[in-house]
Amino acid sequence: MTAIRTIGVLTSGGDAPGMNAAIRAVTRTAIYNGFAVKGILRGYRGLVEDEIIDLQSDSVSNIVQQGGTMLRTARSQEFMTPEGRRRAYDNMKRSGVDALVVIGGDGSLSGAAIFAREFDVPIVGLPGTIDNDLGGTDATIGYDTALNTIVQAVDKLRDTASSHERLFFVEVMGHTAGYLALNGAIASGAEAAIIPEMETEVDQLGELINQGFRKSKNSAIVLVAENPATGGAMGLAERVKQEFPQYDARVTILGHIQRGGSPTAVDRILASRMGAAAVEALIEGQRNVMMGLSDGKIVYVPFSRAVSHDRTIDRSAMDLIRILSI
Ligand code: F6P
């Protein structure tokens, strides 16, 4: 095994607030421990296309508070092919990068596992996604900020919903996971959350909406996790309108607003701790593990578990939404 002298860092897949704080923590912890650091631009695409830059301590100044990622991000088709990964490996070696820190979601970490196996490269990962859908960690970088963005938006929608006595379906992101919808609903006092992990019949939903209208606030808000299979909030609203024409229903899709903005303190701290831990993990000789958070402590989660989608939604959270909206 070659000794690690230079650590490369990249962000890949959908951007998430806090990625910059993570890049900063990786860079500065690596420099503190005597490593050289290189930033790979546009995720794996930058490895394939040889877009690799030097990172010094001042390269990451003033970014802890910024959303997005200073390294840019992409989803690379080429890296999905053996030829693309071979080019990526050759570029990595030519630029002297001995080990990688990959910051991204399940697609990015799955790619990391394949690359590490094929070329025997030391790689550790950080969970960078607003979706909070990675196994073995209580939280992912960007989730808390996205949740706060959702809550702020729903608070505003509540003003107009109650003024007009309307029903709002608010679509939030989540890929195939309902965490943003579920916890967004609890935090904003929504009447219901529709999530891919649990089926909700239109009749059941009608009952929940009725509850909202029986209350003094005279409006109802339903958070819907994006789901192409069901047509998301639009599809749901159409079905509900047919069954319950008495409601003046509207749909709001929050979209990519949820991915932007300055990270919350929670995300900055999480990203800083995980970024530093990733470098320490490489020093310890760890590889093929993602940094996770469990009971407030940083833990190493094998890539295979991180991407396994083995986390189950807490049913009691669904019950809580129902109970608190009566
Ligand atoms: O994985 C993060 C995420 O925000 C998902 O919730 C969403 O489905 C997806 O990215 C959309 O990504 P894009 O529009 O960049 O393809």
Image (tube, rainbow, N blue to C red):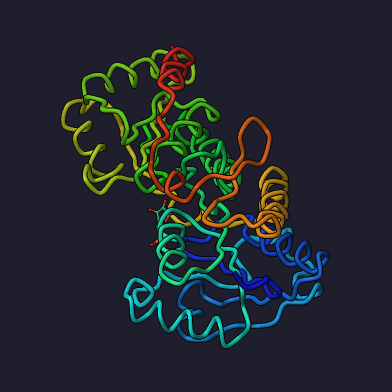
Q: Residue furthest front?
A: 1
Image mark count = 0
Nearest to the observer: residue 301 or residue 275: 301
Q: Position of residue 282 (x, y in %)?
A: 66, 59
Q: Is residue 262 above or below residue 151?
A: below
Nearest to the observer: residue 242 or residue 3: 3
Q: Is residue 2 above or below residue 229?
A: below
Nearest to the observer: residue 188 or residue 273: 273
- If the picture is divided into quarters, which one holds ligand 1? bottom left
Identify the residue at horizontal 48%, vertical 20% (top origin): 217
Quarter of image, res 4:
bottom right
Quarter of image, res 241:
top left
Identify the residue at horizontal 34%, vertical 71% (top origin): 80
Identify the residue at horizontal 37%, vertical 40% (top origin): 225
Q: Is residue 89 above or below residue 316?
A: below
- Quarter of the image with the C terminus is top left
Q: Position of residue 274 (x, y in %)?
A: 67, 50
Nearest to the observer: residue 280 or residue 202: 280
- Quarter of the image with the N terminus is bottom right
Q: Position of residue 66 (x, y in %)?
A: 68, 61
Identify the residue at horizontal 44%, vertical 49% (top origin): 254
Q: Position of residue 187 (x, y in %)?
A: 55, 29
Q: Residue furthest left?
A: 242
